[in-house]
Amino acid sequence: MGLYDSIKVLLAPHGTTKEEFSFGQKLIAGAGSGALGSFIATPTDLVKIRFQSYSPRHPNPYKNTFAAFYHIIKYENGIFGLYKGALPTITRATVLTGMQLSTYDQSKRLLLRSGYFHDNPTLHIVSSIISGLLTTTIVSPIDIIKTRIMTDNTSTNRLYKSSFDCAYKLLMKEGPEAFLKGWLPNYLRLGPHFLVSLSLAELIRKSLGADSF
């Protein structure tokens, strides 16, 4: 969110107002900031996924978070092992953040032009809900692929060779509906997150004397 405005300004001619930014510029600005943040956080995301994938039938081999980092670096291709699944992870964050911020920003502009809304908390809430619905639907297929690859952590007999291989096998074996598995719990996670984070970001910007998104 901190980089969004800066990237958006870089993409447009000097003096462009908030109303004049195109949806494409907003989408690229959100995607760029999401990609950078995700690249930095991929190793911790990998460890999180590994911990969440274990169950009583498949005990967690790691004593703690630091042991997980050590084990992955030692036995899974060094530092590069921490970036297993980086492509779908970064792709997911790129799409998610790009959609989140651009659809929120665009929704605000369209609702303001309708004349029925003003730049206040009600507008921020409605725009956040719209953004949450659209983003969850777009990002769900990428989320499924990312999770499948990150939990495919055996050194032999791996199920998926790449993100594209994973997508192909999902489509062939489980059908198109497989890409929307978990849509509702995903929205129940992302929806409130968007609602709180975007509204809070607006409040913080206003309190610091900055314009709203």
Image: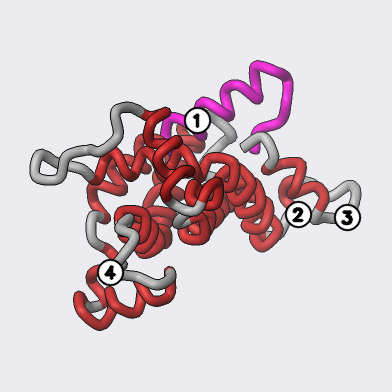
Q: Crowdedness of circle 2 by 10 Å Cα count: few (<14), some, many (20+)?
A: few
Q: Which residue is drawn at 55% across and 46% down?
A: 79
Cβ atoms at labels 2 and 4 below 8 Å apart: no
Query: Which quadrant: the N terminus?
Result: top right
Name the residue tied to disc 4. 157
Name the residue tied to disc 1. 199
Give above or below for 51 relative to 19: above
Name the residue type under label 1: Ser
Distance of mark 3 from mark 2, alpha carbons? 10 Å
State which region is magenta. Answer: 194-213
Look at discs 1 and 2 and give the one toward the viewer.
1
Name the residue tied to disc 2. 20
Marked residue nearer the N-terminal end (3 or 1): 3
Q: Residue at x 41, y 58 (%)?
A: 139
- Please state the horizontal and vertical placement of residue 64, each as a whole percent of the image: 33, 27
Name the residue type under label 2: Glu
Q: In this view, does 41 lie to the left or right of 190?
A: right
Cβ atoms at labels 4 and 1 below 8 Å apart: no
Query: Which quadrant: the C terminus?
Result: top right
Distance of mark 3 from mark 1, alpha carbons? 28 Å
Q: Which residue is drawn at 42% across and 28% down?
A: 66
**Residue nearer the viewer, 62 or 123:** 62
Q: Is mark 1 on a helix, strand or loop?
A: helix
Residue that extends furthest to the left in the rendered view of this protein? 57
Distance of mark 1 from mark 2, alpha carbons? 22 Å
Name the residue type under label 4: Asn
